[in-house]
Image (cartoon, rainbow, N blue to C red):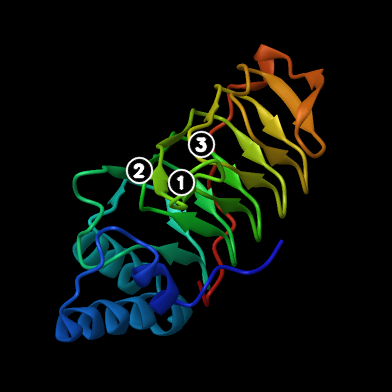
């Protein structure tokens, strides 16, 4: 899986891109600051303030977006109509990629492991014009997503489901299901009794 494109590519790849050069420069500068400056500042307060005010992300109490997360977006508060939410006590780990363009809702007590990619926009491969399409991704409470898993546009991950490391999810995942593989298929079931935990703790000085 190739890394996310440079922010300039993300802007030019979106229907929200403006033909006005000055506006494009402002958008690209904001993208650079978000992903190459703010994302590296070792302070939750600073990062979360930027994400809330510049990107318009709703970050619930106890949620943590760790260092070097990548926010794929198209400009200041461009996500306001799509509604982007990170639920209470949810952890988004290092170098995770959150695509905000099509809308993203993450529930409470969700664990998103390092280098996970959540994609909400792409091109239609059947379109003669290679049309840009987007679709909201929903991750319900108590979901655990393993390292380097990829969620494709439009999927819903049911409450308490587990996505194994490296899996590529192309369709909805049932509550409590454990899925793995490419494309992801169900390989197990999680007992409902385990869904009593509340994520928290694990703070370090430079986060």
Which residue is denoted by mark 3 in the rendering? Answer: 109
Total numbered badges shown on the rendered structure: 3
Q: What residue is at 45 percent from the left and 43 percent from the top?
A: 89
> Which residue was labeled with disc 1?
120
Q: Residues within 10 Å of mark 2 (few under 14, many from 20)?
A: many
Give percent across and percent down for residue 39: 44, 75
Cα distance, mark 2 to mark 3?
19 Å
Q: Which residue in the structure is indicated by mark 2?
A: 103
Number of residues whose C-alpha sits closer than 10 Å to that of mark 3, classed few (under 14), some (14–19) or many (20 or more): many
Q: Residue 103: x, y in percent?
A: 35, 43
Q: Residue at x 44, y 74 (%)?
A: 9
Q: Quadrant of residue 60?
A: top left
Circles 2 and 1 in contact, beta carbons < 8 Å = yes
User: 10 and 90: which one is in front?
Assistant: 10
Secondary structure type for disc 1: loop
Considering the numbered disc 2 on the image, is that residue within a helix, a strand or a loop? loop
């Amino acid at each position: 899986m190739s890394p996310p494109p440079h922010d300039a590519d993300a802007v030019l790849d979106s229907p929200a891109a403006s033909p006005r050069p000055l506006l494009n420069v402002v958008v690209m500068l904001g993208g650079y600051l978000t992903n190459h400056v703010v994302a590296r500042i070792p302070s939750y307060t600073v990062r979360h303030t930027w994400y809330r005010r510049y990107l318009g992300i709703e970050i619930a109490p106890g949620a943590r977006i760790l260092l070097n997360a990548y926010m794929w977006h198209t400009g200041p508060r461009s996500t306001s109509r799509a509604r982007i939410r990170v639920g209470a006590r949810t952890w988004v780990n290092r170098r995770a990629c959150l695509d905000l363009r099509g809308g993203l809702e993450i529930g409470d007590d969700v664990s998103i492991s390092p280098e996970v990619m959540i994609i909400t926009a792409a091109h239609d491969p059947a379109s003669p014009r290679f049309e840009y399409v987007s679709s909201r991704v929903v991750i319900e409470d108590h979901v655990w997503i393993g390292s380097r898993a990829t969620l494709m546009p439009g999927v819903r991950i049911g409450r308490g489901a587990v996505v194994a490391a490296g899996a590529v999810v192309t369709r909805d995942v049932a509550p409590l299901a454990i899925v793995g593989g490419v494309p992801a298929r169900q390989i197990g079931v999680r007992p409902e009794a385990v869904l009593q935990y509340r994520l928290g703790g694990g703070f370090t000085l430079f986060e």
